[in-house]
Image: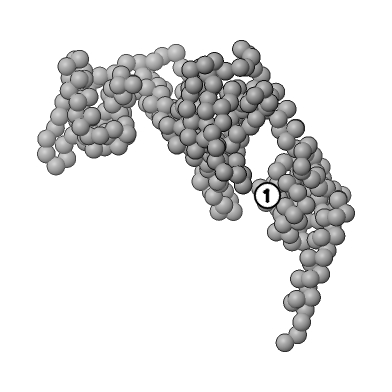
Amino acid sequence: MRADRLVSLVLLLRQRGRLTAATLARELEVSTRTVLRDIEALSAAGVPVYAERGRHGGFALLPGFRTELTGLNHDETLALLTAGLGRGEQAFGLGPALASALRKVVDALPESHLATASDAARRFLVEPETDLLSRRPVTEKVPGTTMSEIRRAVLAGHRLRIHYAATDQTPRWRTVDPIGLVTVRERGYLLATRSGADRTYRLSRVLAAEGLPEPAQRPDRVDLDRVWWERCARFLSEDHIAVQVRVNPERREDLLTSAVALRTAEPDADGWLRLEVTFQDLRHAEWALWQLGTDAEALTPQALRTSLHDRATAFAARYGKSF
């Protein structure tokens, strides 16, 4: 762990020039005292780092201290730099590791690659905090220590104890056999089995985790894409309602934001979209379609059309009164 931190410290100084101990501590997520000890260790190892005193002082490296990585072409370099632009870098708690890896790659790039690739990467914006309608996406966060325990158990193939808060239930400890991790639209999931039965856990609902020494009961090889598809299909077939709906194309994303899933989509004769959308239940479907007003029309099931009609009738009666 300390070796990685020392490398990151050197790379920060290489890329940014003179930095204060406080700035280095913030970037490396350690104390200033740890930074000072690391500086001493680097100096003892022969790394040409020196201190500049005064108001604008700090630590710096002697010019010319660098290595070069020549095996990357322009597009490969650009792909690596772009990978660190979006919020997706935080998936499974690997954001700090990605930032450290990118610092190492950038520091080792030849000057001819670095200038053009860095400029090109600034032309890309991956998953900004708001969309064109000024809606902020919901990003689910998991404490770093909890995520580290889960990640280690998944990769090592060990059993895992999780303190899990299921919907409308008191949090309790469960022992599971982890299979893999999946992230979809800023939401992370742990795929596992428990007593031989398939289980899918929302990572944001894991309050604590503890890796166990015994090996997990799972196959040596797994097709995670197939496992996820099968669990999605099973989830959609249980306790959900499929709705046929016509929607104004401009409101399509609003509808899908509320829905559990989209099954099919095709254009209608008048330019609207005809969709088959899955909702949690009838009440959920009624609420979601009511938000769209006249920009959507439920076609089936009839029970949904009836409930929307009754709501609209009551609404019109309330506001149709004269005063």
User: Which residue carries the number 1 mark?
Assistant: 258
Label 1: element kind: helix
Q: Height in image: 309 above or below 188?
A: below
In the rendered image, the quadrant that contains the C terminus is bottom right
Residue 15 placement (x, y as % from top left) = 31, 28
Residue 182 placement (x, y as % from top left) = 59, 29
> At 58% across and 36% down in the image, what residue appears?
202
**Residue 109 falls in which quadrant of the image?**
top left
Q: Height in image: 118 above or below 264?
A: above
**Nearer to me, 65 or 128:** 128
Q: Is residue 189 visible?
A: yes
**Residue 286 falls in which quadrant of the image?**
bottom right
> At 17% across and 19% down in the image, what residue appears?
43
Give the amino acid type for the residue marked by disc 1 in the picture.
Ser
Residue 87 placement (x, y as % from top left) = 50, 38
In the rendered image, the quadrant that contains the N terminus is top left
